[in-house]
Image (tube, rainbow, N blue to C red):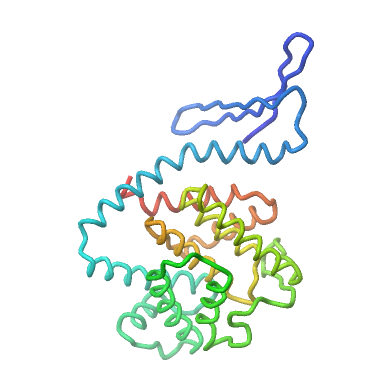
Amino acid sequence: MVNVVKRRKGNQDYYYLYHDSKKNGQRKQLEAYLGKEIPKDIEERKRQFALDIERQDWLPKIEKIYKNFRESQKKIPRSVQQKELESFSVKFTYNTQRIEGSTLTLRDTALLLEDGLSPSNRPRSDITEAETHQKLFLEIMRQKDEISLALVKRWHKDLFLQTKPDIAGIFRNYDVRISQSRFVPPPHTAINIMAKKFFEWYHTSKKKLNPVELAAMVHLKFVTIHPFGDGNGRITRLMMNHVLNRFGYPLLDIDYGDRRSYYTALEKSQTKNDELPFLKWFMKRYLKTHKKYL
């Protein structure tokens, strides 16, 4: 936790940001000088200081994962890499669909996508969306295009044209609420402006942020805009992996079993207007998933 501390030297007060933590039995104390007065943007400075502290921990690990992943990929034949990607696509499709309410089990999804066997006791829409999602995911993994407004709308249209044609590829012109969440999505009148600013942010930030942090922020920022009537989570998880893939980093599958902590982290960041809760959750999940490269 970051606090503001005051130290008196002579007749003058001086203010500092101060962080005291203990990890793996080691105590860590860090501080940053603020000045003779507390700045008006103190909350933003506290957030940035906390983020910089976290980056000191996760960025070296992420770079190690990247280096070792790239080295390992050089040894794997292209055909085997493609088989691994297809296997990932099955589990990723299962988890991302299940998080959003699909009734298909992992076994249902595997039999459907690998063997072409449709479960007889599941809604047709769940089956169609699983098939469409895997096809779209594999197509996205072949794409080298930058994410753009037109591209994301096309992905959404491809994903939902067969099951929800009335919303496929269209930004909502009505307000929505998210069940069991304290976060209220922006009004529909703000969506186009927010989407425009999002892509402006992306094109600037892709040159500054580590790609894994960029992928996490793309997920958080776009799902917070919540521009579509349905499917925002699925689209942002596709965007997340598109960014990781484009920069050559290993992909991430957010497990259905982690959905509660996932939603909690998202909600904290959205309601507090603070990206750190979700970033910490995302990085912990990413490092755990790819610990074999550390």
| Residue at (45, 82) in percent of width and height | 132
| Residue at (49, 64) in percent of width and height | 146
Question: Please, which residue is most extreme toward the top here?
Answer: 10
Using the rendered view, name the quadrant where residue 2 is placed: top right
Quarter holding the N terminus is top right
Q: Is residue 251 above or below residue 115?
A: above
Viewer-nearest residue: 120 or 90: 90
Viewer-nearest residue: 168 or 117: 168
x, y percent for residue 24: 44, 33
x, y percent for residue 281: 52, 51
| Residue at (57, 27) in percent of width and height | 30
Q: How many marks?
A: 0
Left or right placement of residue 293 versus residue 53 in this view: left
| Residue at (71, 73) in percent of width and height | 176
Left or right placement of residue 183 versus residue 162 in this view: right
Quarter holding the C terminus is top left
x, y percent for residue 98: 49, 73
Q: In this view, does 86 lie above or below 163?
A: above
Using the rendered view, name the quadrant where residue 137 is placed: bottom left
x, y percent for residue 49: 61, 36
